[in-house]
Image (cartoon, coloured by chain):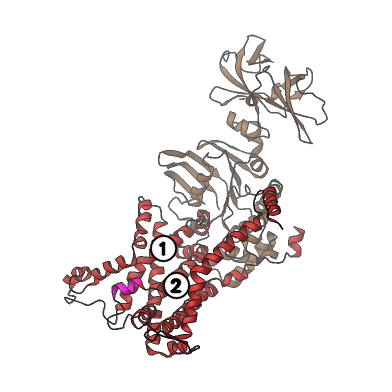
Chain colours: A red, B brown
Amino acid sequence: MTSAELQRRWQKRGGLTDPQFALTIVIAVLLFNLIIIIIPLGYSFYLSLHDTNVILKKTEYVGFDLWAEAFAEEETQDAAIKSLIFSGISVVLTFALSLAMALVLNLNFPGRGVLRALILLPWAVSEVVTATMWTMLLDANFGVLNGILAPWAVPDGQVWLNPNWVLFWLSLAFAWHLAPLGTFFLLAALQTIPQDLYNAARIDRAGVFSRFWHVTLPHIRYAILIVLVVVTVEAFRQFDLVFAMTSGGPGTTSQILPLLIFRYNFQFSQYGLASAASYVLIIVATILAMAYFVLLGRQRKQVRVAKPTAAVKAA
Amino acid sequence: MAEVTLQNIVKKFGETLAVDDVSLGIADGEFLVLLGPSGCGKTTTLNMVAGLERPTSGQISIGGNRIENVPPDKRDIAMVFQSIALYPHMTVYQNIAFPLRMARVQKAEAEQRVREVAQLLRIDELLDRKPYQLSGGQRQRVALGRCVVRQPAVFLFDEPLSSLDAKLRVDMRVEVKKLHERLSATFVYVTHDQVEAMTMADRVALMDGGKLIQVGEPSEIYRRPANRMVAGFIGSPGMNFLRGRFSGSQGAIAFEAPGVRVPLPANLLAGNSLNGADMTLGIRPESVKVGTAAQSSASVEGSVFATEPVGSDLFLDISFEEGAAGLTSLFKVRTVPDLKVRVGETISLQLPYESIYFFNASGWRIHPA
């Protein structure tokens, strides 16, 4: 087809057909993704298969040896467990906080418009600022928490970020930061529930908890799914907040996987090992996200159009 | 026994008066339709009986027990909503069984009751479906089933048929009526559709502007409308109105409206004290006859502005004022479908004296007394 012919066709059709337009957009986005995601991911995969010696500027193909090393390394296993604990507490706290705030903001009370705007603020604050704030709240010597609790016989200079509790406090800071986003999703879903359903449930003798269980929850289940996936993935790849608050300390008690990868990469220049460990992280996060879809999305499968029965055909 | 009594019910939303001093007694087993234009307070009244709204003042009782402060779940009522309001994630079976589940009815008994109700409403084939897999009429029946299964003393309906298409609405009307006959429970049914009200109700309660205007059997509401609003609202199309005055005296009074003079016998209205007063003459489209002078009717002439054939009947739109045929002042006449008339033609109409109504300046009926 000559370009003149193309030109004529273009003018004749007055632009693109719908499928052409769709394809153009999809291909453009895919190209963009290729550049910013696929290529770095590919390069990272290449690195994970090579042992790199920075000083000798030598790269040697080692197959999946580094992967095996990443799995076998006690440090990696330890970090993976820390990651799981941190993510577990984070998801529970964030989700509970999101849902509670969404339910409150869904009520009708004066000033809720202002409150809805204000509640998003923690999410808008950068993670490093969040970390600084929580560090100051929890500081043993001049922290706000110790100041408030002083009259109740909490020992002066209580170290909150101690090895036993550091993951909990990090999770709490994380929840404080991310819960507004969850609230946003859940509130949007809550507002689509028709009032008549609640009225019907009230007349059907459903109490407050039954109404929540049978009307509210089923209606927002897909919003819940999205929130859980987003929060889990965010928690699993969390770096900024933890790095700024504890840098993985005390000792390595809060050294979650992304921090360890950072250290492999930038402190020990073990690019291959860092890449291999990154892949471990991606795989675990993906498995977790899929698990939600399987658990919460399973009812979707039942949502199929039943074959019309004879009676329906007759009707 | 489940008679429902409303006494001096008032409901205000802020400064707005939604229901204005409504008193109404509904007998046990009665089918009462609350009828009125949108915003007349009928749904608010129903919601107060349901317990979804609390009256600002006044008393409500069901079966002799005061219930204004009783929550909806303890009132022994069931309700069908305008939006149907089936639980979207539950199957038909679960939807119908839901009130029983909440009332902790034994599983076996619940199942039996659900199946009975499903059979009664011919939805037993659909029990495994989800609401979105049903047609409008089927959803309606499921919503009915969810009410029937509870065996409540009072059924409340909030314009349940308004979301259905015209054909289905006619079928469901009969279905609801049959259901009432079978259950002999008290039905309170809100609608803005006068045909629904006339066809289903034992008694109709007409509301307007938050006030209860008239309560009566459909035929009474049709024959003896309390005011212009009722007369215009009931009937399809509604009553024709001519605004004008009486003139003349002794033996030869007449009603004069712009473009038309209706001669009347002197004894039609007691006394001539009404001379000169603002008045509205009303007559139903189906009472007017086309043709020349007949016994005991007033003869008038008008020009045909438009014709509306509907198959079974022919409706004529008559205009009395030459050139000033605003659509609001058109006078409708129902006649036989094969009548030959041309638009613009002058036509003779007979208004039988017995079918003529008069309403005073504030709209209330003064004739027939």
* Residue annotated with mark 1: A181
How many numbered circles are shown? 2
Query: Where does the image place residue B5, in percent across and percent down from the top left?
Result: 51, 46
Residue type (three-letter) at the residue carrying disc 1: Leu
Label number found at residue A233: 2
In this view, B304 is above or below A3: above
Residue type (three-letter) at the residue carrying disc 2: Val
Residue B141: name its quadrant. Answer: bottom right
Residue B349: name its quadrant. Answer: top right
Say which of A67 and B264 sits in front: A67
Does residue B134 appear to the left or right of B87 in the view shown? right
Is A110 magenta? The answer is no
Label 2: how many Cα within 10 Å (few below 14, some 14–19, many 20+): some
Query: Which residues lie in the magenta part?
Result: A240-250
Does residue B337 appear to the left or right of A185 in the view shown? right
- Residue at 66 percent of width and 36 percent of height: B219
Does residue B366 appear to the left or right of A69 in the view shown? right
- Whole-angstrom CA distance, mark 1 to mark 2, is 14 Å
Query: Where does the image place residue B209, in percent across and percent down from the top left?
Result: 51, 35
The mark nearer the N terminus, 1 or 2, is 1
Task: Please say whether residue B99 is visible from this viewpoint.
Answer: no
